[in-house]
């Protein structure tokens, strides 16, 4: 049986996935929160969307993949 926390987490992941799909192809600012309180900032476009991950083509020429849970846990912030 699922506990309420699992259900709320699932609902949030579905909202995050929907938001990512709505912003596909748009220019976004991304903050990546790394270990030891260091953050990295970049800009890019969401280019590919899959069931468990999405791909951002960064303007610095690097493709980066993220899990939807990275947003939920605060590992990345997208604006």
Image (cartoon, rainbow, N blue to C red):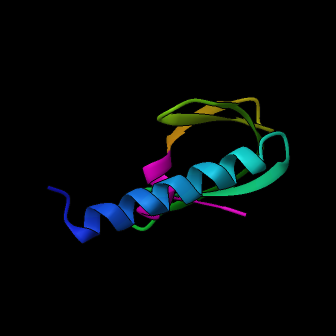
Position above or below: 17 against 5: above
**x%, y% of residue 46?**
73, 39
**x%, y% of residue 8?**
37, 67
Closest to the observer: 48 or 56?
48
Displayed quadrant of residue 54: top right
Closest to the observer: 12 or 63?
12
Displayed quadrant of residue 77: bottom right
Q: What segment is highlighted magenta in the picture?
A: 68-79
In the displayed structure, does residue 4 sit left or right of residue 18?
Answer: left
Number of marks in the rendered image: 0
Please give the name of the residue rendered at 50% of the width and 48% of the height, measured from the top-left corner. 68
Closest to the observer: 46 or 49?
49
In the displayed structure, does residue 4 sit left or right of residue 13?
Answer: left
Considering every residue shown, the one lying at the far front of the view is: 1
In the displayed structure, does residue 15 sit left or right of residue 10?
Answer: right
Quarter of the rendering occupied by the N terminus: bottom left
Is 69 magenta? The answer is yes
Please give the name of the residue rendered at 58% of the width and 49% of the height, measured from the top-left corner. 17
The answer to whether any part of residue 79 appears in the image is yes
Is 78 magenta? The answer is yes
Position above or below: 19 against 57: below
The answer to whether any part of residue 75 appears in the image is no
Please give the name of the residue rendered at 57% of the width and 56% of the height, measured from the top-left corner. 16
Please give the name of the residue rendered at 54% of the width and 61% of the height, measured from the top-left corner. 39
């Amino acid at each position: 049986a699922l506990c309420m926390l699992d259900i709320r987490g699932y609902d949030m992941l579905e909202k995050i996935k929907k938001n990512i799909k709505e912003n596909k192809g748009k220019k976004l600012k991304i903050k990546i929160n790394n270990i030891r309180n260091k953050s990295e900032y970049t800009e890019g476009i969401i280019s590919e969307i899959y069931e468990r991950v999405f791909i951002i083509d960064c303007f610095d020429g690097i493709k980066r993949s993220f899990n939807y849970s990275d947003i939920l846990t605060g590992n990345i912030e997208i604006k």
